[in-house]
Image (tube, rainbow, N blue to C red):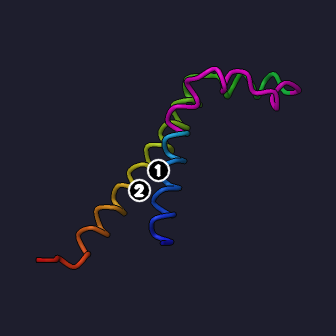
Amino acid sequence: MSALLSILSSLLVGLVLVFAPWTSIWESNWLLQPWPALRGALLSGFARGAVTGLGLVNLVIALSDVYLRLSRAPRRG
C-alpha cells in the first residue's frame, strides 16, 4: 500500500510541476506580490523550465518505480 501511495504522489507532484508553471495560476500568485523582483524571476522562462524539469524528474522516478515493481512481481500462470 505504501508503494502505491509513493508512486501516486510522485505522479501527481510531477504532473503539477510540469503543467502549473505554464498556467495562469503561476502568474497570479498572490504570495509574491510584496516582492516584484522575485516575481519577475519566477515568471521567466528559465524558472518555469527548471520547475518543469523537476516535474519531469518526478514522473521518471514514478514510472521507473512502477517498472521495477512490476518486473519483480511474481508471475502467475
Secondary structure under the numbered disc 2 in the rendered image: helix
Image quadrant in which you'd find residue 66: bottom left
Measuring from the top left, give residue 10's x and y in whole percent.
50, 54
Q: Which residue shows up at 55% across the image and 39% down it?
A: 16
Q: Looking at the picture, which amino acid does disc 2 mark?
A: Ala
Magenta highlight: main SS: helix
**Residue 23 part of the magenta segment:** yes
Q: Nearer the viewer, residue 57 or 3?
A: 3
* For residue 58, above or below residue 28: below
Q: Which residue is tagged 1?
A: 11
Considering every residue shown, the one lying at the far left of the view is 77
The quadrant of the image that shows the C terminus is bottom left
Q: Which residue is tagged 2?
A: 62
* For residue 13, above or below residue 28: below
Q: Which residue shows up at 46% across the image and 50% down it?
A: 11
Label 1 neighbour load within 10 Å: few <14, some 14-19, many 20+: many
Measuring from the top left, give residue 29's x and y in whole percent.
75, 27
Q: In the visual, does 12 lie left or right of 43? A: left
Measuring from the top left, give residue 38's x and y in whole percent.
76, 28
**Residue 61 part of the magenta segment:** no
| Range shown magenta | 17-34
Considering every residue shown, the one lying at the far right of the view is 34
Q: Which residue shows up at 45% across the image and 69% down it?
A: 3
Measuring from the top left, give residue 70's x and y in whole percent.
27, 67
Q: Looking at the picture, which amino acid does disc 1 mark?
A: Leu
